[in-house]
Structure formats: structure tokens, C-alpha cells
Image (spheres, grey):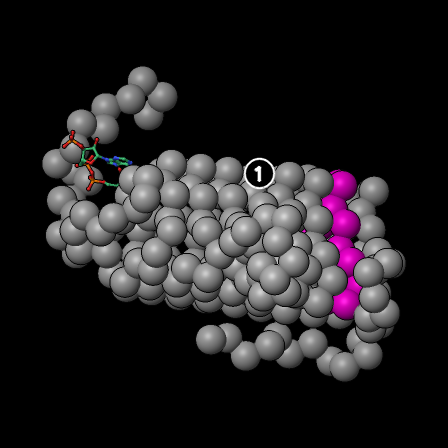
Amino acid sequence: MTPPPEVPENATFNADDHNLDDNVVVGYHCERKEVPPLQIGENARLRRGTILYDGSTIGKNFQTGHNVVVREECTIGDDVAIWGNTVIDYGCVIGNNVKIHTGIYVAQFTIIEDGAFLAPGVSIANDLYPGDDDSAEVMAGPIIEAGAQIGVGVTLLPYVRIGAGSIIGSGSVVSRDIPPGVVAFGNPARVNRNVSDLPPVSTRDTDHPLR
Ligand SMILES: CC(C)(COP(=O)(O)OP(=O)(O)OC[C@H]1O[C@@H](n2cnc3c(N)ncnc32)[C@H](O)[C@@H]1OP(=O)(O)O)[C@@H](O)C(=O)NCCC(=O)NCCS
């Protein structure tokens, strides 16, 4: 797993080191608990509507689309992009070179390792029995290992581990661990084949009027 990003301790945020739109909030006050100031590495590109809470640590070259929220106590690596209308809830760990697309909910205590990709509309759960106090005590999101590719509209249930480099087909509901290097899909998601056995895309009918 990625080591935490190298952001100088007590770094003060200097807007001149970044490329910020209007209506961006860097260091939003955390009401849930007392947290240290937000730390963020150089060269962030933050688009209108982004809100980054205090108490998180973010590496360099961070990019956001419109209306992105990153809550407190998250650790995010270098070269991470998070696109519009996505919420990263508190206490998540995200590695380097992670791409998190549009309209995604990343639940508290989710781990996303280096190079993983989440396609639009992915939903992540962390509370197995909603409304149950014991379940709330132990809530945790999934672990998405390095380079895993999560398709559009996938739902990941609490605690599942998505193996490194695996592809989860669009619309799947993942309720059990998925090993590394496989294609899995369906509700519930089941392994279909190895990624290495996918036919070359050139064998598919990819004709399209816009290309
Ligand atoms: C999972 C996936 C990689 C499988 O690709 P593939 O191995 O080439 O699959 P095929 O198209 O040959 O389909 C094999 C069978 O699985 C079914 N299938 C494929 N993907 C499925 C999915 N996501 N959910 C349910 N069934 C699926 C197909 O209908 C087909 O069934 P059939 O044999 O009864 O007709 C691909 O379908 C997919 O979902 N890719 C992700 C797309 C995406 O979300 N991209 C994100 C960026 S926009």
C-alpha cells in the first residue's frame, strides 16, 4: 500500500501554488471532531464547488471536477483525480495515480490502492446492517487493490476485497472477495474469466458514428 504522501508537516496552504477556481473551499471546518489543518501538496487543480475538509492529507497534483467533497481524516496520494459530484467520506486511504470518476460515493474507511479506477456511478457501502449499533461500530468499506478497474454503476458491499488488476463489470453488486487478475460481474458478482483471457478489443464490433 502507498505510503502517506510527502506533504511537509504544518504546511500552510498558499493559493499561489495551485490553480483554483472561485468557490473552492480548502480547509472546511470539521464539526465531527477536532482535526489538524488540511495538508495538500503542490500544484492542485481544484474546480468550482470543490470542498476539502480540514484533517485530511493530500499529495501533489491533485485534481478535482466540480462539486467534489473530500471529508476529514482522509489520506490521498500523489496524482489523484476525482471528478464531478463525487463524495469521499471521512477516514479513507487512497493511493497514488487513482482515478475516481463522476457521481461516486466512497464510504468511510475505504481503501483504494495505487492505480485503481472507479467508473461513473460507483457506490460503496460500509455498514453491513444499517440501523444496527453493533454494525455501525465496525463499519468499514472495501479494499480495492492496486490497478483494479471498477465498472460503471457497480455497488461494493462492506469489507470486500477486490484483487489487484481485476475488472468488475458494469452494474455488478460485489458481496464477496474477488481474487486478483480476474473479470467478475453480475449480482452477486461472480468470476467469469482471467483478465489475460479477455479477447483483444479489435475482435469486437466497435464501429461507432462518432469515431
Ligand atoms: C465485464 C466485461 C469486462 C466483460 O467483457 P467480456 O468478457 O468481453 O464480456 P462479453 O461481452 O463477451 O459477455 C459475455 C457474457 O457476459 C454478459 N456480461 C458482460 N458484461 C456483463 C455485466 N457487466 N453484467 C452482466 N452480464 C454481463 C454478456 O451479456 C454475455 O452474456 P451472453 O453470453 O449470455 O450473451 C464488460 O462487459 C464490462 O462490463 N466492462 C466494463 C465497462 C465499464 O463499466 N467501463 C467503465 C468505463 S466507462
Which residue lies under the disc numbered 1? 103
Which stretch appears magenta?
45-56
Quadrant where the image shows the C terminus: top left
Q: What residue lies at 71% left-to-right and 67% top-to-bottom?
A: 73
Q: Quadrant of residue 177?
A: bottom left
The amino acid sitting under disc 1 is Gly
Where is residue 116? Give x, y as percent.
Answer: 43, 58
Residue 71 sits above or below residue 77 on the image: above
Front one among 116 and 191: 191
Residue 203 sits above or below residue 12 on the image: above
User: Residue 131: within the magenta?
Assistant: no
Front one among 142 and 100: 142
Q: Helix, strand or loop at disc 1?
A: loop
Residue 97 visible in the displayed image: no
Left or right, residue 60 beside residue 198: right
Where is residue 201? Give x, y as percent.
Answer: 19, 40
Left or right, residue 196 beside residue 153: left
Left or right, residue 134 beside residue 194: right
Q: What residue lies at 64% left-to-right and 78% top-to-bottom?
A: 6
